[in-house]
Amino acid sequence: RYGKPLISRLLTVNGGCVREPGNVEEPVGTLAEEVIAFCGGLAQAPARLLLGGPMMGLQLPSARVPVIKGTSGILALTAGEVAEREPGPCIRCSSCVQACPVGLLPLEMSRHIGAGDLAGAVKLGLKDCIACGCCAYVCPSRIPLVQYFNHAKGELAAQRLMGVKSALGDGSALLTGWLLALSLPPWAPWWIGVLGGFIAIIVGKQVFGGLGQNLFNPAMVARVALLVSFPVAMTQWLAPVPLFSQHAPGFVDGLRITLAAPALPDAVTSASLLGYAKTELSRGVDLLHALGQPAGALFAWTGTRAGSLGETAAFLLLAGGLYLIVARVISWHIPAAVLAGLALPAAIGPGLDPLHYLSVPAHLLSGAAVLGAFFIATDYVTSPNTAAGQLIFGFGIGLLTWLIRSWGGYPEGMAFAVLLMNALTPVIDRYCRPRILGRRRDGRVLQEAQ
């Protein structure tokens, strides 16, 4: 209008703490403390410092805040002017509804926000609120309605920036359930899966704050809880038969097995390679004699061996894991480190005592080694952020898995190893920080370091 930009503002400087209240014109960018100093300074420390008016002004943490083009005043209020008191219960007087210039229902919106129902508050017109403060000013119960609305708007803006969607549709619960299903015995009753799903989602994830906040892998939390609580149901395996063969159960038979949970017939019971080896060694039988006759069935890597789907389909899981690396869904660091941490001691053990230690192929292609390396340990939330940290994390999982398999009480140690290293992830992240551009890893500037 006048051919020049806005470079100054007319401000009202007022409040019981200001020595010489008045209206002043100050350049945009002037600190609030300089404006107050121009008006004689402060007679006492203010109980509340506002940038703006008494109803829509923003509370300042200090006076070192600049004046902006929307600033209308600076208020330094005494404790008597603030007259703070605890909010009381709503008496449903409808004063806030009558005072709202937009015609909203502040009381109902605050009720939805307090219950965490942001969608309900939006339906009532939350986005139409201009934060004028009329509702809070006239409220006899002193309910901070404007703060509720500003908080809800900030939460909606943060969700919009992060692209947060409904947790039911993000696929995380489906992935957790699928990983758990891959680790369950095929003859497990239906309630094992239901209880495992509850433990994984509620105990393993929601207790920590939901998706992205959990410390441990939810599927492995459920796996370990079920294994410790129901060892018999979680270690019953059956001898595999070709699909659609005469002795293979059909669709109806599969439903009956899952829902009715009949006892596992002795004629079809079997043992996984790790479980069989652990049992025979506990009986004093060395591996040379223990694996003499059933070695062919136990080392059949095509999937025709006892175990869960995540233990027998090693080649299919390996192909899927390599696809994830090629598609850059995961990096190679954790899978390579897990397999290396498992293969290295497995290569040394048989050389020292071949009668009591399984070979490298037995460790890598049996149990949940491949599943854990590519699909479980690579969980974004529970693994380290840096490449060096991921290598340490993965190698620790592989080494702990070998130790538990060789000397522990359980034949399979992948789930326990993952949970133990999940607990160490914050420590690994602390000591494997990425280098800041222009600085050494100790924080010094590169020029100073030279």
Image: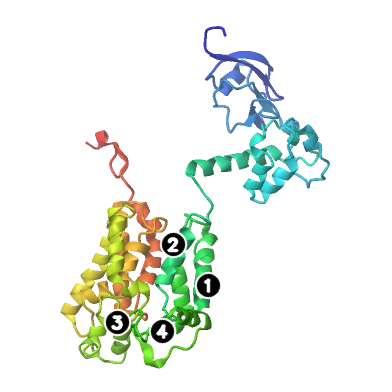
Q: Residue at x 58, y 23 (%)?
A: 32
Looking at the image, tell me whether mark 2 or mark 3 is earlier in sequence order.
2
The amino acid on which the numbered mark 3 sits, given as a three-letter code, is: Leu
Looking at the image, tell me whether mark 2 or mark 4 is earlier in sequence order.
2
Callout 1 secondary element: helix
Label for residue 236?
Answer: 4
State the residue position of label 3: 273
- Tell me if residue 420 comes above or below residue 362 in the rendering: above
Which quadrant of the view contains residue 390? bottom left
Q: Residues within 10 Å of mark 4 (few under 14, many from 20)?
A: many
Expressed as whole percent of the image width and height from the top left, the position of residue 83 reads 75, 35
**In this orientation, does residue 215 appear?**
yes
Q: Nearer the viewer, residue 327 or 449?
A: 327
Q: What sort of colour scheme is used for the picture?
A: rainbow
Expressed as whole percent of the image width and height from the top left, the position of residue 336 reads 25, 61
Callout 4 secondary element: loop
Q: Residue at x 66, y 43 (%)?
A: 123
Looking at the image, tell me whether mark 4 or mark 1 is earlier in sequence order.
1
The amino acid on which the numbered mark 2 sits, given as a three-letter code, is: Leu
Q: Nearer the viewer, residue 112 or 88?
A: 112
State the residue position of label 2: 175
State the residue position of label 1: 194
Q: Quadrant of the C terminus?
A: top left
Residue 163 shown left or right of residue 50 in the figure = left
Q: Residue at x 21, y 69 (%)?
A: 344
